[in-house]
C-alpha cells in the first residue's frame, strides 16, 4: 500500500505507474490543514476517474473520527473507494461507528452495500495498546490492522521511538506485536508500518523481510521507489517454494504420519501449514 498526498496531482498520477497493490489517497498527515478542502475535491475526482480497480485498489486515509474533518472527508464515499484507512483509533468501537456512517452513505451515494472496507492504524494512541483484542468480530468491513510508531511516541511525550542502537524501544515493539496478534485473532491482514528513510533501500529490504518472517502479510510505502522492494520481500523465493513443496509432498506420501524427517530436520504440522501458505502465496504471484 503506497501513501499518496491527496492534494498532489503529480503524485496521484505517479501512483498509477507503480506496482503497489493499493494506493492510500491521504487526507490526513500528508496534507496541510489549509489544503484539506482542495484534497477532498481532488481525491473524489481521482476516484471517479478510476473505476477499474482490478489491478490497483484505491483507499482513502481520512482524519480521525474525533475531529470535525472526518465527516467532511467521507464525501469521498461518492467515488466508491475500496476502503478507508482510519487513523488514531482507540478501539474497535470506532470501526463500528465508521461502519454505521458508511452504511448510510453507501445508500445515499448508490454505492454497493458493504463494499467499502476499513483498516485502522491501531496503535497511535496510548489507550489503543490496551484494546488490540477488541477487533474480533467488530465489523464485516474490517480488512486488516496496521500500526504506527510516530504518533504514539508524540502522545507519550517521547523524544524518539528508537534506542541508541537504532532498534525500536520496548513500547513500540509491543505495539507491533499486539497489532500482529490482534489482526490474526480477528482473521484479517496484519500490515506492517512504514519505513521512514526512503533513501535507504537496504534498510527497507531488511525491515520488510523481518516483517514477513514475523507474520505480516504486507507493508505500507511512503515513496514509489519503495514499492518494488516491498513486493520482492513479501514474495516467496524459488528456494522457499521448493522447500515448501518438499514438505507438502512428504506429508502427502505419508498420510498417517504427524512428524516427518527431511534432511535431518523434524517437520510437523505447523511446518506443513506454513508450507501450504507459502505455496498458496506463490501461486497468487505466479511463482512456480
Image (cartoon, rainbow, N blue to C red):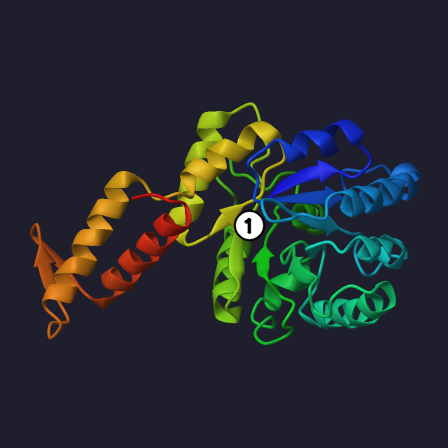
Indicate the position of residue 224 as horizontal and vertical percent values: 60, 30
Q: Nearer the viewer, residue 111 or 69?
A: 111
Indicate the position of residue 267 as horizontal and vertical percent values: 16, 60
Q: Quadrant of the N terminus?
A: top right
Instruction: Say which residue appears at 62% left-offset and 48% top-offset.
Output: 148
From the viewer's perspective, is residue 41 above or below residue 182?
A: above
Instruction: Say which residue appears at 58% left-offset and 44% top-offset.
Output: 55
Instruction: Say which residue appears at 67% left-offset and 47% top-offset.
Output: 52
Q: Quadrant of residue 90?
A: bottom right
From the viewer's perspective, is residue 277 above or below residue 149?
A: below
**Residue that numbered label 1 is attached to:** 172
| Left or right: 147 as drawn, with respect to 231 | right
Residue at the top extreme? 199
Mark 1 secondary-structure assignment: helix
Indicate the position of residue 18 as horizontal and vertical percent values: 59, 33
Q: Nearer the viewer, residue 128 or 190?
A: 190
Mark 1 crowd level (few <14, some 14–19, many ≥20, 10 Å Cα): many
From the viewer's perspective, is residue 146 above or below residue 25?
A: below
Q: Nearer the viewer, residue 126 or 284?
A: 284
Please say whether residue 248 is visible from this viewpoint.
yes
From the viewer's perspective, is residue 232 above or below residue 119?
A: above
Q: Quadrant of the C terminus?
A: top left
Indicate the position of residue 19 as horizontal and vertical percent values: 55, 36
| Left or right: 42 as drawn, with respect to 158 | right
Residue at the front extreme? 52
Instruction: Say which residue appears at 55% left-offset and 55% top-offset.
Output: 175
Please say whether residue 165 is visible from this viewpoint.
no
| Left or right: 69 as drawn, with respect to 171 | right
Amino acid at each position: 500500500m503506497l501513501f499518496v498526498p491527496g492534494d498532489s496531482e503529480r503524485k496521484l498520477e505517479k501512483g498509477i505507474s507503480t506496482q503497489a497493490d493499493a494506493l492510500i489517497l491521504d487526507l490526513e498527515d500528508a496534507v496541510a490543514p489549509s489544503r484539506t478542502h482542495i484534497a477532498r475535491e481532488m481525491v473524489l475526482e481521482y476516484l471517479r476517474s478510476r473505476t477499474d480497480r482490478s489491478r490497483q485498489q484505491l483507499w482513502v486515509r481520512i482524519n480521525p473520527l474525533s475531529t470535525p474533518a472526518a465527516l467532511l472527508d467521507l464525501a469521498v464515499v461518492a467515488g466508491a473507494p475500496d476502503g478507508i484507512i482510519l487513523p488514531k483509533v482507540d478501539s474497535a468501537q470506532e470501526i463500528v461507528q465508521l461502519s454505521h456512517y458508511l452504511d448510510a452513505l453507501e445508500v445515499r451515494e448508490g454505492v454497493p452495500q458493504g463494499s467499502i472496507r476499513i483498516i485502522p492504524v491501531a496503535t497511535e494512541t496510548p489507550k489503543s495498546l490496551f484494546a488490540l483484542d477488541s477487533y474480533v468480530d467488530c465489523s464485516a468491513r474490517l480488512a486488516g490492522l496496521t500500526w504506527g510508531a510516530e504518533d504514539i511516541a508524540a502522545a507519550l511525550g517521547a523524544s524518539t521511538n528508537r534506542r541508541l542502537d537504532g532498534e525500536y524501544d520496548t513500547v513500540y515493539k509491543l505495539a507491533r506485536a499486539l497489532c500482529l496478534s490482534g489482526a490474526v485473532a480477528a482473521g484479517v491482514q496484519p500490515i506492517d508500518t512504514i519505513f521512514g528513510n526512503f533513501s535507504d533501500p537496504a534498510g527497507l529490504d531488511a525491515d520488510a523481510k523481518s516483517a514477513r518472517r514475523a507474520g505480516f502479510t504486507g507493508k505500507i510505502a511512503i515513496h514509489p521507489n519503495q514499492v518494488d522492494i516491498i513486493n520482492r520481500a513479501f514474495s516467496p523465493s524459488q528456494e522457499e517454494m521448493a522447500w515448501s513443496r518438499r514438505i507438502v509432498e512428504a506429508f502427502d506420501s505419508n498420510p498417517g504420519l504427524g512428524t516427518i524427517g527431511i534432511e535431518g530436520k523434524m517437520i510437523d504440522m505447523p511446518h506443513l501449514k506454513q508450507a501450504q501458505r507459502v505455496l498458496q502465496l506463490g501461486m497468487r504471484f505466479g511463482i512456480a
